[in-house]
Amino acid sequence: MESNPQESTLFELQYDEELKSSLQGAAKWAGMAALVSFISTIIGMVSFFIQRAKMQAMYREYAEYGISQPAMNSGMISALISFVIGVLLFVFLMKFSRKTKSGLESNDGYLLNEGFSGLAVYFRIIGIVLIIAIIFILLALLAIMGQA
């Protein structure tokens, strides 16, 4: 088997400079996407608290119209769950970005493997969230069909 000087072997994975460049580009974009999603999560939380303050003021002013305080508290739980999911997605996508870049720069297979494990966890979280969302949508459709 001939050895090509442009190819490196990393855990029996053959990759050339083109693949290395593509992986570095993917890691760079993943880092940017992670930062944008984290900023979006923070903006969403700030927006939630601003809206919550407006709702509390409205609740105090129009309490006799039936706006319940527990309904407002459930919004807080939903916002916290969204925040936790957003932070977890940021952490694992950023882990992929940093570890993959470091692993490719230093030809360290362990770091590259750690980066890809972060990406795998990222996609697992997204998969779980999507499955839960589909279940809620199906339950809502069943409830609507049951009322008809």
Image (cartoon, rainbow, N blue to C red):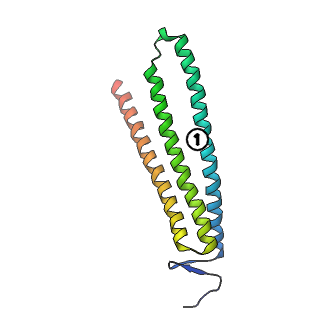
Considering every residue shown, the one lying at the far bottom of the view is 1
Do we see residue 90 in this rendering?
Answer: yes
Considering every residue shown, the one lying at the far top of the view is 64
Q: Looking at the image, which residue is at 52% across and 71% down?
A: 110
Tell me the quadrant of the picture where the N terminus can be found. Answer: bottom right
Do we see residue 19 in this rendering?
Answer: no
Considering every residue shown, the one lying at the far left of the view is 146
Q: Position of residue 32 (x, y in %)?
A: 65, 53
Q: Secondary structure at mark 1?
A: helix
The amino acid type, in three-letter code, at marker 1 is: Thr
Q: Position of residue 73 (x, y in %)?
A: 46, 26
Residue 50 sits above or below residue 103 on the image = above
Q: Position of residue 75 (x, y in %)?
A: 48, 29
Tell me the quadrant of the picture where the C terminus can be found. Answer: top left
Q: Looking at the image, which residue is at 63% across and 56% down?
A: 31
Q: Is 143 or 57 nearer to us in this picture?
A: 57
Residue 38 sits above or below residue 25 on the image = above
Q: Looking at the image, which residue is at 55% across and 58% down?
A: 95
Q: Looking at the image, which residue is at 56% across and 74% down?
A: 108
Residue 97 sits above or below residue 133 on the image = below
Q: Position of residue 41 (x, y in %)?
A: 58, 41
Which residue position holds label 1?
41
Q: Quadrant of residue 146?
A: top left
